[in-house]
Amino acid sequence: MDYVSALVPPVVMAAFFIALIMVIVKTQGGDKKAKEDAAVDAALARVEAASARQSDPASRDGSSS
């Protein structure tokens, strides 16, 4: 019966892990997906705008030619 007590913890952990993955997959999307996507798109736009300003040579020296 030692093999049963040795196998129970990994089996229980595997079952909980599978349940966790199933919950994560099921909660993706839904009615809040558009709001989350919009927040990510806005954050990416801010990062891209900041990197564009840094790489623009005219904005570095203050002159626009």
Image (tube, rainbow, N blue to C red):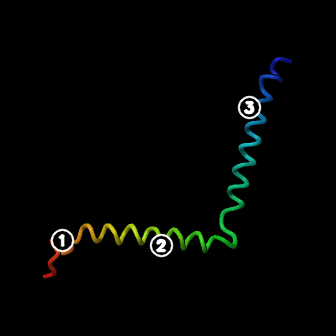
What residue sits right under mark 3 in the picture? 10
What residue sits right under mark 1 in the picture? 57
Vertical comparison of 3 with 12: above or below: above
Earlier along the polypeptide chain: callout 1 or callout 2? 2
Looking at numbered disc 3 in the image, what kind of residue is underneath it? Pro
In-image side of 42 versus 58 (left or right): right
What residue do we see at 60% from left, 73% from top? Answer: 35
Disc number at residue 42? 2
Q: Circle 1 sits in a helix, a strand or a loop, which is it?
A: helix
Circles 3 and 2: CB atoms closer than 8 Å = no
User: Who is closer to the viewer here, 12 or 55?
Assistant: 55
Mark pair 1, 3: CA separation: 58 Å
Classify 10 Å Cα crowding around label 1: few (below 14), some (14-19), many (20 and above). few
Disc number at residue 32? none
Percent from the top left, x then y, of residue 16? 75, 42
In-image side of 18 versus 65 (left or right): right
Looking at numbered disc 1 in the image, what kind of residue is underneath it? Pro
What residue do we see at 82% from left, 17% from top? Answer: 2
What residue do we see at 78% from left, 27% from top? Answer: 7
